[in-house]
Amino acid sequence: MASPDSERAMALGALFLALKQVREIAEQGRTDNAALAVCLRGLLGHYQNDVETLYGEPGCLDEGLRLLADHLSQPRNMQLTRYLVSVLQLERKLRRDRGRLAEVGDGLERARGQMDYFGEVTHPSVIASVAQTYKDRISPLRPRIIVQGHGRYLEDERHAAAIRALLLAAIRAAGLWQANGGGRLRLIFGRPQIIESARRALSQVPSG
């Protein structure tokens, strides 16, 4: 069984992976289907005390873990920091609103049904279903996440749906971070330990 430090690092790595995909879609119009699948598996799967297994095979979160370690070591992108802070705030608000949380759960259950029907976690209907849940249940909350990017990408219906689905996946990852002992104070004062845990998790990824 993974240690609490490892679970927290993996959860935060998943959060960073989702936010990285949000930025790439919004700013470049580029969708990494493999990374999108990882994020959606974590959102629609059932957590059984192993974050990495929830998201997929060993190494599936390494991109997010690298970004996590780099960003916490030397933040270079304030937009990423703003996204991170907003996601953590929204997760906290959602967790305290049991009615809304149950509604989000119902929406995700519908998306799971579509995933089972189409046999593909990144099927457009699955993404659209998750995106609608975000739009209906998360968008009314504050702070509202204002995604910055190029209008031609943000106004594209499929890109917009993927961004909303990824933001909900980021909130899910923030919930896993919190459930494993994460929190605002740990993120502020425990950065060296988080970075070390992320790098240790990366070092355990099998090569080849």
Image (spheres, rainbow, N blue to C red):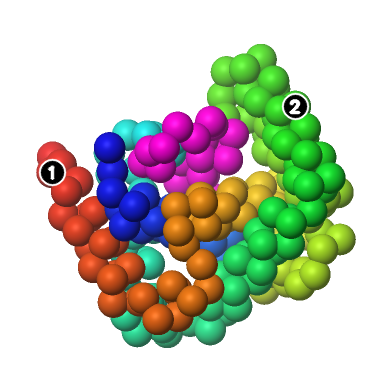
Disc 1 residue type (three-letter)? Ser
Q: Quadrant of the C terminus?
A: top left
Residue at the (40%, 81%) spot, across then down: 189
Q: Is residue 56 visible?
A: yes
Q: Is residue 47 magenta?
A: yes
At label 2, counting other C-alpha atoms closer than 10 Å, the crowd grade (few under 14, some 14-19, many 20 or more) is some
Q: Where is residue 122 shown, x and y percent of the image?
A: 58, 34
Q: Image height check: is 156 above or below 67?
A: above
Q: Give the number of the disc on residue 110.
A: 2
Question: Which mark's residue is nearer the viewer, 2 or 1?
Answer: 2
Magenta residues? 26-52
Helix, strand or loop at label 1? It is: loop
Residue tagged by mark 1?
Answer: 207
Q: Quadrant of residue 195?
A: bottom left
Is residue 51 inside the magenta stretch? yes
Relative horizontal placement of residue 109, taking residue 66 as reference (left or right): right
Q: Position of residue 80 (x, y in %)?
A: 53, 74
Q: Main secondary structure of the magenta part?
A: helix
Of the 4 image quadrants, the one containing the N terminus is top left
At x 76% / y 72%, what residue is drawn?
Answer: 143
